Amino acid sequence: MTSQKTIHLKEEPTPGCYIKARYVVTIMAALGSVNLYLLRNSLNIAIISMVGVSNSSVSGEDQNETAGLPTTAVVCPQYQTNSTTIEHVSQYQEGEFDWSLVKQGLLLSCYWYGYIVSSFPGAWLAQQFGIRITLGVASLLSAILTFFVPVAARLSFSLLVALRITLGLLQGVTLPTIMQSIGIWSPPCENTRHVALSFTGVASGNVVAFTFAGFIIWYFGWECTFYVAGNYATK
């Protein structure tokens, strides 16, 4: 029976340096995860305002299969009054795009078609071209594409689908690149610690996206969701 060895790191203090380089890399990896989930979830939230509640209801083609589903729209109680209920229902259900449920499902899922493809060579690309170049180029191009989501949506549905697939291709390299950076910069005895710290960006990105996107849409319109997310990604 062999005993497990405990490895202790002995580090000399660096004058003027208060945070070790590997922790700086981990913090940057967490911020990269926040960026990833902000850009990914922007459409997931904005699509509710883009198509409206009425257009998200069951279409005539699917009524036979979904006859048991409720068809009455739900409106926030604060907008319901005895005299103006109908006016508020029509006001808060309007959407700019008349997309069927099939198109909405395709739009939300096509991102993953590209994401799956680029996840496999992600770490290899980081090894060939460097972590900063791979992650930096992917983040910059993803931000630029996110800026053009409103324009693409108004021009053509097919163009928007192609944009989302391309966005998935670019962002699929993010997590493999982050794992590559942690494997290079952190010692083996601290790998799990740095992986856990970097993945705090996953939860943080979801919290930020789902918390603030609603306020942005309410006050400035659904287009600003993509502008804010793309602007953050370019920082």
Image (cartoon, rainbow, N blue to C red):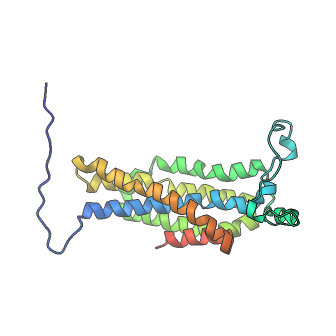
Marker count (numbered): 0
228 left or right of 219 in image:
left
Q: Position of residue 67 (x, y in %)?
A: 84, 38
Task: Name the residue: 48% across, 65% down.
Answer: 139
**In the rendered view, would you say 101 is above or below 201?**
above
Quarter of the figure with the N terminus: top left
- Residue 20 versus residue 86: which sits nearer the camera? 86
What is the quadrant of residue 84 in the picture? bottom right
Q: Position of residue 231 (x, y in %)?
A: 53, 73
135 left or right of 4 in image:
right
**In the rendered view, would you say 179 is above or below 145?**
above
What is the quadrant of residue 128 in the picture? bottom left
Task: Residue 9: tell me if it is visible.
Answer: yes
Task: Name the residue: 17% across, 75% down.
Answer: 16
Task: Name the residue: 80% across, 41% down.
Answer: 69
89 left or right of 208 in image:
right
- Residue 173 versus residue 12: which sits nearer the camera? 12
Which residue is outermost to the top?
Answer: 1
- Residue 166 versus residue 71: which sits nearer the camera? 71
Which residue is outermost to the front?
Answer: 82
Task: Residue 148: tell me if it is visible.
Answer: no
What is the quadrant of residue 153 in the picture? bottom right
Q: Position of residue 44 (x, y in %)?
A: 63, 56
Q: Position of residue 8 (x, y in %)?
A: 13, 49
**In the rendered view, would you say 222 is above or below 58?**
below
Task: Name the residue: 50% across, 51% down.
Answer: 118
